[in-house]
Image (cartoon, grey):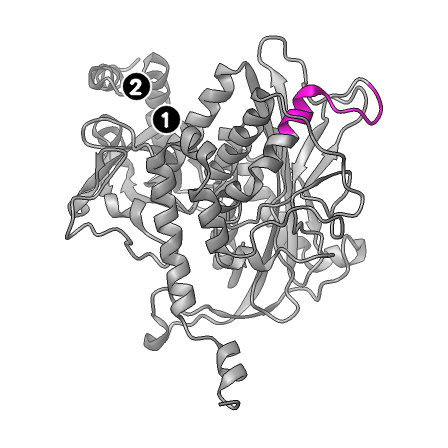
Amino acid sequence: MEPDAEGFAQALTRTGNYDAAGVARAVEVLAAVAEAGLETIRVVFSDQHGILRGKTIVAGALASAFRSGIGVPSTLLLKDTSHRTVFPVWTEGVSLADQPFGGAGDVILRPDPARFVPLPWSPHSAILFCDVHLRSGAQVSVSSGAVLADAVRKLDAAGYRAVFGLEVEFQVFEVVDPALSHAQATMPPAPVQTRNLTQGYQYLTETRYAEAEDLLDRLRRMAEGLGLHPRSMEIEMGPSQFEFTFEPSDPQTQADRYVLFRTMVREVCQRQGLVASFMAKPVLPNAAANGWHIHQSLIDAATGRPLFRPDAPGALTPAASGWIAGLLKHASACCLLTNPTVNSYKRFQPFQLAPNSQQWGVDNRGAMLRALMSEGDAASRIENRVADTSANPHFAFAAQILAGLDGIARGDTAPPPSENPYADGAAPLPRSLIEAVEAFSGSAYLREAMGDAFVDYLAKVKRAEWDRYVSALSEWEHQEYFGLF
């Protein structure tokens, strides 16, 4: 180890912020930055909406960032989807879980050297994921990383490991008008005007792949360069709609992959005069909804045995049955974590390959839970089709883990599978964001598992979004009433 590297390691050890492995990895990151000639580092965290926020620092400031962290306004954790701060930080002493947030003071981004990702589309730069701490050193308990880490700890304590798979739908459009006039610089800004890249409705038609091959090749190569391990690229159902799938992994790795993929697609497309959207149901003629199907399975941590693998055709293991029962029992309460926007609930339509009620089926794409299980198949798993691509993956994965664990812990069993999920009379999913907020806020189990502070915090953020929505005048209202009264 060179003297400067050794001095850095000793200084970092004295802070007490990293264990020996973390210190060694931080030294490796500094060396990699120097060797690659990187100029800037994007020091980021995943906010409450699953959007990456943070600061870009010069490479020479990286050692200081490891030693002392990077300060950012605490209000970044208190904003709704319009970027408005919805907590009264100027008039009251705001606190969350006894953690102070008044006065728009700083929280500290603590870099995680194990989550350092050079950017193939921006070869002079890299992303460095961070955990969010208070100046006291305590981790912010309502932050995305802390919420998922707590759920994973509960999973570990129960003797399980979870494996999650990603299957992500999105659209890419050509930008016709970038909406840069002064009048369009509203909060949130006016959407850009677009047109399609493909006509759509030719799902998985090989002859149409060439229309988007250059784009999909570029996105695939960038995903591979990020270490995201993509598996497939597809022409999806709707106009300009595509899907990527990824190799399965642990929940925390997959959550990072998801936010990295969403960020990469938007940035790469922007450089090509395109715009990518992961909105659940774009308000565009003939646009299809974007689902995010969460594949999940459970492994015995002691033996490595796949706990969803059945021993007989058509059977459910006790773990799979309990996990399904838990996901169904808490489906409404968890919707806020898998379907977090006003727009999310426009996707729950019958006969559209999206669920609208709480049931499961055997390899049935209309059901909320699609069981993909075969005798002797170690990849046997449950696919939850409820989520959409606007979800924060840390919160969504935490919801799956906590709901599934509760079903197993209580010894619950799954009801009979549905063969006609749009007509079997199962309990409906929430019909609106406010229904989901009330179900989430009223869940005694999620309050116990996630804490009152987190439940109240997220409910307040999402109620602010709903309140803005219901107070806004719409084209529907004008058309319905202007000529009538």
Question: Range of the magenta residues?
Answer: 312-323
Amino acid type shown at disc 1: Pro
Residue nearest the viewer, comparing 478 with 37: 478
Regarding mark 1 in the picture, which secondary structure is present there? Answer: strand
Q: Is residue 12 left or right of residue 144?
A: left
Magenta region includes residue 322: yes
User: Which residue is the site of mark 1?
Assistant: 113
Which of the 4 image quarters holds residue 239?
bottom right
List the single residue furthest toward the right: 313
The residue sitting at 51% across, 35% down in the picture is 399
Amino acid type shown at disc 2: Tyr
N-terminal-most mark, 2 or 1: 2
The residue sitting at 66% across, 21% down in the picture is 319
Question: Marks 2 and 1, Cα distance to the nearest angstrom?
Answer: 9 Å
Magenta region includes residue 104: no
The residue sitting at 16% across, 48% down in the picture is 92
The residue sitting at 34% across, 43% down in the picture is 457
Q: Is residue 200 above or below residue 444?
A: below
Q: Is residue 62 above or below residue 260?
A: above
Which of the 4 image quarters holds residue 283?
bottom right
- Report whether residue 352 is seen: yes
Percent from the top left, x then y, of residue 238? 69, 61
Percent from the top left, x then y, of residue 201? 75, 62
Q: Is residue 261 left or right of residue 20?
A: right
Percent from the top left, x then y, of residue 187? 34, 65
Q: Is residue 266 left or right of residue 131?
A: right
